Amino acid sequence: MTLDQDTIVAIATPPGRGGIGIVRLSGTTALPLLLPILTLDSPPSPREARFTRIKDPSTGHLIDEAVVTFFPAPHSYTGEDVLEIASHGAPVVLDFLVQSALEAGARLARPGEFTQRAFLNQRLDLTQAEAVRDLIEAQTLHQARLAAEQLGGALSRRLAPIKQSLIHLIAALEAGIDFAEDDIDVLPDHEILSSLERITRPLQALEASFAYGRILHSGLTLAIVGAPNAGKSSLFNRLLDRDRAIVTATPGTTRDLITEHTAIGGIPVQLIDTAGLRQTTDEAESLGIARSHEALATADLILLVTDSGQPLSPDERTLLESLAARPHLLIRNKVDLHPHCTEPGLSTSALTGTGIEALRNAIAAQIHSGSAAESGLLTNRRQHHAITQSLASLAEARQAVHHRLPHELLMINLYAALQALDELTGATTSGDILNLIFSTFCIGK
């Protein structure tokens, strides 16, 4: 993918009015383009904030006061000359700055083009560029902290020794093939298999991190299910800390899915209140129950809410057994009415709040269970696909060794594994894929 040489301009702050608004330019002519409308005695020094006034060149009238900062290449975000003008956040002033830059020869930046240029100028690799987007879109401090780690190169650092080991193996095999007549030793099969194992093990651990990384990036879906009148909607309201679902003593009040968003354990959670699971002839309630089963099938975590005053019914036991292999919590609700309940499960009272904090902690423990202790996680499907492709090629390489195939054929699998790792960081990613990734960024970043 070639680097566009145009100077680009965009408003880097959110739309609307504010105390401060920033216009950003990047390119070889970033500084001279707007000098005619700035009252600077001399060009700004690198990375020094300078006070200036913005004037209309056609009339000489003052438009605004601003602070201008110049970041010369290559020591800037994009690796090019970057000029940032911080004025008052009036849309008319920001539009004037952009329009002045366009008339002077700049063009409007595409979504994510500043970060794309940073990537193409090798200021960031692709995992770090994706972390920029994740940091902007973070909804919780936990998401922001881990996105900042990724931006700092946590995933790249975790991948580097794995990739280096693979390159060393390839080099050793290449030497054995190319210089066989010069008494270069050919690696024996057991050493090749040992090297493949050393490469595969940390890659498998990295691949496993996607289960947690996906939830961290996209959030968790939590379905609250159970029989009618078990207190599902009351529990739903308690977890939200507000009355969102209608609660009555009449069984079957909830007839459709109710969804709301909250944060638990630093992770965004989509709570789903479902219709009570039972046999009914009511058409509307039947449709709601069908949707409850759909939510049950797709949820990341399930809360099975039961009445602590009643033993588990056959249907509840059957449902609980079906959840054995999936993340779930058994909730024994209404303990305010039945304080001596000794049945297994987490005791709560949605009415009084008893056990709600313990429930939040249990949900957080489920979310974070099995999460990687070290930093550097796979957070999107593109990254996960690259790692699974690399692991598949390494598995084929092991089979080639076991079948004593020529090393030339083994090398095909090893190079395929290396190429998949290069796609993870962007070293061999096609322009079409890059355009798709950066198009999801906001304009000005």
Image (tube, rainbow, N blue to C red):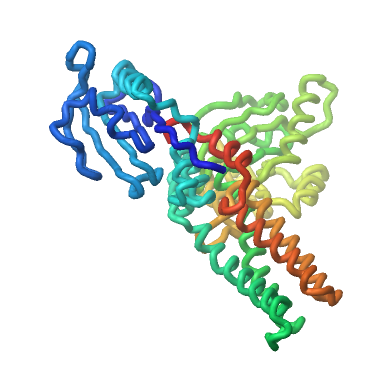
Q: Residue at x 73, y 77 (%)?
A: 177
In the image, residue 102 lies at what x, y percent?
Answer: 38, 22
Q: Please state if 3 lies on the left or on the right of 75 as rendered.
A: right
Q: Is 232 situated left or right of 361 in this image?
A: right
Which residue is the extreme one toward the left? 41
Left or right of 127, for residue 101 = left
For image coordinates 30% across by 24% down, the residue present is: 18
Examine the rendered structure and indicate whether residue 384 appears above or below residue 304. below
Depth order, front residue of 11/303: 11
Question: In which quadrant is the C terminus drawn?
Answer: top left
Please name the residue shown 64% across and 34% down the image: 272
Q: Is residue 374 visible?
A: yes
Looking at the image, residue 259 lies above or below residue 127: above
Q: Position of residue 186 (x, y in %)?
A: 72, 83
Residue at 75 percent across and 30 percent down: it is 291
Name the one closer to the observer, 280 or 184. Answer: 184
Q: Residue furthest top?
A: 59
Residue 274 pos. (x, y %):
69, 32
**Total numbered circles:** 0
